[in-house]
Amino acid sequence: MQPLSQTERDLVSGIDQQRMLSRTQEWAAINSGTDNLEGLARMAQALSEAFAALPGDVTLRDPAPVVVVDADGREVEKPHGRHLVCSVRPEAERRFLLTGHMDTVFAVDHPFQEQQWLDDETLNGPGTADMKGGIAIIAEALMALETSDVASSIGYDVMINADEETGSLSSAALIDELARGKFAALTYEPSALPNGTLAHARGGSGNFSVTFTGKSAHAGRNPQDGRNAIVAAADCAVRLKAMQHADLPINPAKIDGGAANNVVPDHAILRFNIRPKTTQAAEEFSRNLDALVQTLAREHDLAVVLHGGISRPPKPVDEKAQKLFDLVRDTGAALGHTIGWQSTGGVCDGNNIAANHVPVVDTMGVRGGKIHSPDEFMIAPSLTERAQLSAIVLHRLATGDML
């Protein structure tokens, strides 16, 4: 373990707990569910003001078009909020990427909208951990970094997207653009466990919709003339589940469609998710799915259309990424914190960053837990813990060649 130098101690001396806490509470009071475009616009404005304190350009990027399948099987464009990018010293040879997301899973009409203190250190509130506290850490750590002598020799991009909770479909190209050529990346999802444990290797994720178009008929008079789309969708769900194995969890999640009980249904949509743990498993599934679609169309004598794909590739931890994890662990130890890691089946923008062969640690945010539920909480002192950790990690990345 490399102990803290006097330079590093001075670097973090100005980190302001109250400023981070106030920002987190202010931002958590803004409902910014992924579909709440008005709330996302308010969040983007508030974040623009916070990141304007850094010596770079803050812009709001328009979302890329995203097409989804509605309950009637039609492909429709889904609107998204704009994504914030703060770019500092783009001409620097060594540059970093820091990412977060402004959206939450709580819709504007969700009952979980208020904050409350559970004890002197634990704040319960929507988005406090996932991840408005993390965004406050990004801003504070970079403000601290800018006070150092090495800041002028490095550059970085900050990207806060508006659609991470639904797969980052409208920001995936932006993430790819910003990740290319970066020396390292940090993402500010909350810790994997309340004790500060990091997420290590991650599986991938893909969401799919399969539309079945059959032929309606009277269920009593001439059912043989119909082509039952619901039966085909159910058959597909069963066959998909049978394709599951240790490296490929598959979850058939929902079937839309059907009609009155006395009508053979001519329309159905099956929606399902996969979690490939390896690239090989993802590629093998893609081939098998194409074959399954053809088989179902033939055996049920109806039309089958596939929509969707893998939006989060699996994230293994290679040698460079492991060195970054080691750096975070050792820096934490120098600050008096024990930081470990564990693999997880969850996914985030770290998956997309790693696909660009950039080392990334993607749980640099607050310590907290029970995210995506009304019991979500943030451990408030971890704002300072993690801001200090990030500032020193970035300083050491700027001054060393450890990756």
Image (cartoon, rainbow, N blue to C red):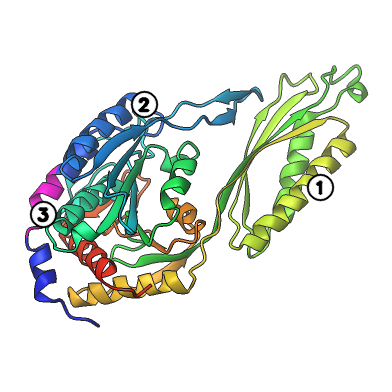
Task: Using the image, determine if residue 396 lies above or below residue 290.
Answer: below
Q: How far apart are marks 1 and 2 (CA)?
A: 39 Å
Overall secondary structure of the magenta stretch? helix
Q: Which mark is residue 17?
A: 3
In the image, which residues are magenta?
14-22
Task: Using the image, determine if residue 283 lies above or below residue 114.
Answer: below
**Circle 3: residue type:** Gln
Residue 6 picture location, percent across and down: 9, 74
Residue closer to the observer: 117 or 188: 188
Mark 3 is surrounded, within 10 Å at the Cα level, by few (under 14), some (14 to 19) or many (20 or more) other residues, namely: some
Indicate left or right for 348 with 151 as reference.
Answer: right
Mark 1 is surrounded, within 10 Å at the Cα level, by few (under 14), some (14 to 19) or many (20 or more) other residues, namely: few
**Circle 2: residue type:** Leu
Q: How far apart are marks 3 and 2 (CA)?
A: 30 Å
Mark 1 or 3 closer to N-term?
3
Which element is circle 1 on? Answer: helix
Residue 318 picture location, percent across and down: 49, 71
Asked if residue 150 can be seen in this view, the reply is yes
Which residue is denoted by mark 1 in the rendering? 291
Which residue is denoted by mark 2 in the rendering? 37
Instruction: Confirm or deny contact between disc 1 and disc 2 (CB under 8 A).
Output: no
Mark 2 is surrounded, within 10 Å at the Cα level, by few (under 14), some (14 to 19) or many (20 or more) other residues, namely: some
Residue 135 picture location, percent across and down: 26, 48
Q: Is residue 31 magenta?
A: no
